[in-house]
């Protein structure tokens, strides 16, 4: 596995910035709901995009504990390592 | 701090919907149904194009007669749960009727369709199992997943290849994998490619549950839904449905050939901890089921009407979902425009459902219509005419 939390976080930021509605100044510590103004459905749809890029599935119950982009990156890395 | 302060965002969103004197779209009162297709709203006779009453059976004379007779014979309620004093002979009769209709060996009847999904999904998929849900699943499916503690994975809407990819990622992990799809999706009226999902189920060894709430009585030669229409009923392990659409009453069910379904009666909280259906509802449901079985022309007329409404709205320059089905939604871009359009429809005597994001796919507001077998061509043409008039007034008719 080559992914690290930093590399996954950077990939998430890059994916988010492809959406013109997302603020330009986001980073790993940005809060997904508060700073990006995503509702619950938008979060789930965005995570689906990341899942496809990294070939991993993030169970919905794991999303409940995720606040920041770095949290999501850490979750994905742990799931990748577990698989 | 008020216990309601967390809903301030909701309050301001509702205030913006009703700003300028518009109605609260979630508080419409049908003062009196006049027929299955016409109701009294704000004192005016209004065409009903948003009731999910696909075969018009909520006003079936046979069902009404059966309900009256059952109330007179058995009373108006059971006052108990199915696992205590709430199972009467009628409940067993209805379960047997549904087994015969679906050609399945086992059936559980629930008090609502919502509870049928909640109670079946939460009990089937435990904490060591995986639930794979279509991204556009109904709230009852998502809520069932939360009640059951399974690991929940979403796949792209109506995309069997995407499901296959996600099941492949789970290869070698312990726990059952239960896939949940719907026959017809309630917001856009699009139909599941059930045969494709059945093929993935066969290949991967997953279990398949189909919520045919909107498709029973609508699709299939005998009205058993999309699985029948696609010839893959043997691949569907569990069929969940409701009485509150094509059968015109209230309640829900799950049918299956797996004997284990009877154990679910003892571990499904939404089945165990609520009062069972009252006798008059059971009797009306059985009478409606008889009509559904004996009057296939209702399904033919329903689909003819669906095609007429779908084509009419498209000809009026409005954007609709891809398929003509009993749910036909007009897709708009802007919530304020959708709210104004919906208010104007009601002003001009047509009731439809206003569906707003995030309850809709792709963040688009919808004017969601549902058509009935009992709508006359003239009623459909009148509704389409009203849609077209408003679209012109609002400059929304695209290249019509």
Image (cartoon, helix red, strand yellow):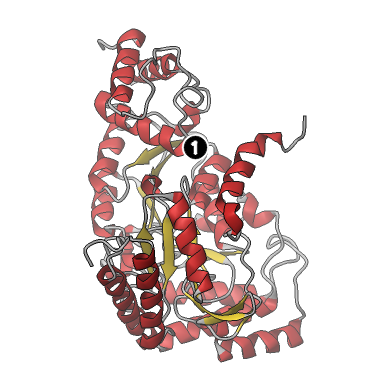
Looking at the picture, tell me which residue is in the foreground, B34 or B300. Answer: B34
Identify which residue is drawn at 58% across, 74% down: B249
Q: Quadrant of the rendered structure where residue B238 is? A: bottom left
On the picture, is B162 further left or further right than B61?
left
* A12 up-or-down from B152: above or below: above
Q: Quadrant of residue A6?
A: top left
The residue shown at (60%, 63%) is B112
Q: Residues within 10 Å of mark 1 (few under 14, many from 20)?
A: many
Counting the numbered discs, the total is: 1
Q: In this rendering, would B94 be left or right of B230?
A: right
Quick one: B52 or B15, which is closer to the camera?
B15
Residue in front for this viewpoint, B327 or B267: B327
- Pick the quarter of the image with the N terminus of chain B: top right
Where residue B377 sits: x, y (%)? Answer: 36, 86
Tell me, yes or no, if residue B51 can be seen here: no
Label 1 marks a residue whose chain is B
Q: Residue at x 70, y 34 (%)?
A: B5
Q: Regarding mark 1 in the picture, which secondary structure is present there?
A: loop
Q: Residue B218 location in percent, x, y? A: 38, 74
Residue B274 position within the rendered picture, expressed as x and y whole percent measured from the top left: 70, 58
Q: Taking A82 as reference, is B80 above or below it?
A: below
Please say if A60 is above or below B282. Answer: above
Q: Position of residue B99 (x, y in %)?
A: 47, 72
In the rendered image, the quadrant that contains the C terminus of chain B is: bottom left
Instruction: Residue at 60%, 48% (x, y): give it.
Output: B14
Q: Which residue is mark 1?
A: B150
| Whether residue B400 is visible | yes
């Amino acid at each position: 596995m080559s992914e690290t939390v930093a590399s996954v976080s950077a990939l998430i930021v890059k994916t988010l910035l492809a959406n013109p509605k997302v603020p330009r100044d986001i980073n790993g510590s940005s809060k997904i709901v508060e700073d990006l103004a995503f509702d619950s459905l938008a979060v789930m749809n965005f995570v689906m995009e990341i899942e496809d890029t990294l070939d991993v599935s993030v169970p919905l119950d794991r999303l409940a504990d995720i606040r920041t982009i770095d949290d999501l990156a850490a979750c994905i890395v742990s799931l990748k390592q577990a698989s | 701090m008020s216990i309601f302060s967390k809903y301030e965002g909701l309050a301001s969103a509702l205030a913006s919907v009703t700003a300028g004197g518009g109605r609260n779209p979630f508080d419409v009162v049908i003062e009196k149904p006049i027929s299955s297709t016409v109701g009294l709203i704000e004192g005016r006779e209004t065409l009903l194009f948003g009731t999910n009453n696909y075969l018009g059976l909520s006003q079936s004379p046979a069902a009404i007669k059966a309900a009256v007779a059952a109330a007179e014979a058995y009373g108006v309620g059971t006052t108990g749960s199915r696992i205590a004093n709430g199972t009467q002979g009628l409940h067993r009769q209805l379960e047997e009727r549904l087994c015969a209709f679906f050609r399945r060996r086992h059936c559980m009847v629930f008090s609502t369709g919502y509870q049928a999904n909640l109670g079946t999904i939460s009990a089937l998929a435990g904490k060591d199992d995986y639930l794979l849900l279509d991204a556009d699943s109904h709230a009852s499916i998502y809520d069932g997943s939360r009640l059951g503690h399974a690991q929940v994975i979403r796949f792209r809407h109506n995309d069997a290849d995407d499901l296959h990819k996600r099941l492949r990622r789970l290869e070698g992990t312990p726990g059952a994998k239960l896939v949940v799809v719907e026959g017809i999706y309630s917001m856009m009226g699009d139909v599941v490619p059930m045969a494709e999902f059945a093929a993935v189920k066969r290949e991967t060894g997953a279990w398949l549950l189909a919520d045919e709430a909107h498709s029973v009585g609508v699709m299939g030669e005998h009205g058993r839904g999309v699985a029948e229409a696609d010839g893959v009923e043997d691949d569907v392990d569990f069929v969940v449905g409701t009485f509150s659409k094509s059968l015109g009453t209230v309640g829900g069910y799950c049918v299956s050939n797996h004997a284990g379904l009877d154990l679910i009666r003892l571990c499904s909280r939404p089945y165990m901890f609520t009062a069972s259906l009252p006798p008059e509802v059971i009797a009306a449901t059985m009478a409606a089921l008889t009509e559904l079985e004996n009057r296939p022309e209702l399904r033919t007329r329903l689909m003819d009407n669906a095609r007429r409404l779908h084509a009419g709205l498209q000809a009026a320059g409005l954007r609709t979902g891809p398929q003509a089905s009993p749910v036909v939604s007009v897709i708009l871009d802007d919530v304020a425009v959708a709210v104004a359009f919906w208010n104007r429809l009601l002003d001009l005597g047509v009731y439809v459902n206003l569906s707003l994001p995030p309850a809709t796919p792709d963040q688009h507001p919808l004017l969601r219509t549902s058509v009935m077998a009992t709508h006359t061509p003239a009623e459909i043409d009148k509704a389409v005419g009203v849609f077209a008039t408003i679209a012109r007034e609002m400059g929304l008719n695209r290249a019509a």
